[in-house]
Image: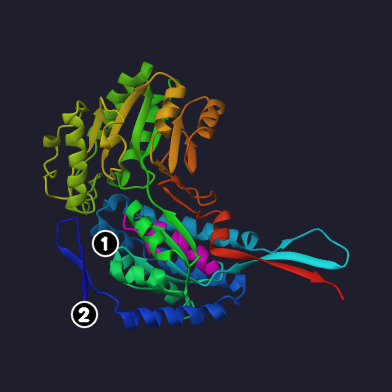
Amino acid sequence: MAIQKTISPVDGSVYVERELADPARVEAALDKAVAAQRTWRETSLAERARLCSKMVDAFVARRDELARELTWQMGRPIAVAGGEIGGFEDRARTMISLAEDALAPIRLVDKPGFTRYITREPLGVSFIVAPWNFPFMTAVNAVVPAIMAGNTVILKHSAQTPLCAERFQQAFDEAGLPEGVFQHLHLSHDAAETVIRDPRIAHISFTGSVAGGAMVERNAAGHFIATGLELGGKDPAYIRADVNLDEAVPGVMDGAFFNSGQSCCGIERIYVHESIFDDFVERAVAWVRQLRLGNPTDPATTLGPLVRPAAADFVRGQVEEAVAAGARAWIDPGDYPHSVPGSAYLAPQVLTGVDHSMRVMTEESFGPVVGIMPVADDDEAVRLMNDSDFGLTAAVFTRDIATGEAIARRLEAGTVFTNRCDYLDPELAWTGVKQSGRGCSLSRIGYETLTRPKSFHLKHA
């Protein structure tokens, strides 16, 4: 019997232990999902919406409990952990409300003697692999629309956040969802690959690393099934000379340091017009210095640990390498007693004197560090922002909205912002380019990846 242990970044203790599913359990889950989907696909959209809405009601009713568990599993400060429950609710209810329009048959103009239309057909069984950094919001992006579209779901959550999968199950069970429509499995990496290769799987949604996305593609190759891959980013922000720094600085710095920088769409590179560079850096450093690093169960903590010591040491290595190459580190780690090498706790850091020869400006950090570079004009900013293997989001801060939109059109990213960042609007398509992945979730377009078109060409007798 294989056991999965979740080590809490709060204090290094074992917070959760779960038995991993054995081959017999996996086989039973797949058979149950296939059988349940035959009935579920015939269930009315109104009934699907009713049950999914009841699930959301049951889920958000446990907000405080879920927030505490989240803090202990992945380290987000308790003062803000409950916000993810609100994000979960917004995304779920939005996708429920969009389903009727997104899944409606496409009626074609009349053609004498013929009836023609296109329906959106469910794919079958969806295997969803969710990450630990925003464990409820990332999972709900796929889970609720998959079920609304008539598919059944098997959810494999990160080993760091296994309780999140169980809370989905609990809420669906309380809502009265038919057995087998939603299931969760605690799986080893090898077992997850086996599920991906299984011919009963018709759709895969994966959120995680580039290496993980490559693993999904290798195992799904030759099965000709739908896959959605959201693989992270190295997202940039550009601060134009015309900005209101009182608004731009807190906006972009929160986008860089929220969740200890562990956000796929967090800001990891900042380009500032040279005329305001010094002023911006001074204000940005002051903003970071007010962060309080500490135990995330303390309501006064505003910066929690990273998910594990290895993640913190990885970011430390990026910073040390950049400084050795000539970068300036503005924050003294000695001011943060909790920041100890070998622990999950890491002092925040702001770097200048950086360039794209340094890993900290090209390689995903996923931690509380940001590099800031001066630029001479919009063209230089665009060139540097696009000089990346990633392309999830990008942000332009400016008072000139028309120019900001024109710059945004030139940026190679799935979502572009002006005057905000690190945000997801569920009515907009969530997608990436380059190594940030492929496919689309959320919005009415997201339903296209969870269904297939079926054309009806009926000649009248």
Q: Front-most of 242 and 438?
A: 438
Q: Is residue 179 above or below residue 194?
A: below
Residue at (49%, 60%) from the top-left corner? 92
Q: Is residue 272 left or right of residue 357?
A: right
Residue 268 in percent (x, y) is at: 33, 38
Q: Quadrant of the N terminus?
A: bottom left
Whether residue 243 is visible = no
The part of the image, by quadrant, that contains residue 293 is: top left
Point out which mark residue 1 bears: 2
Q: Residues within 10 Å of mark 2 (few under 14, many from 20)?
A: few
In the image, what residue type sits under mark 2? Answer: Met
Magenta range: 128-148
In the image, what residue type sits under mark 1? Answer: Gln
Question: First in sequence: mark 1 or mark 2?
Answer: 2
Residue at (48%, 68%) from the top-left corner? 223
Residue 431 in percent (x, y) is at: 48, 49
In the rendered image, which residue does mark 1 sit on? 160
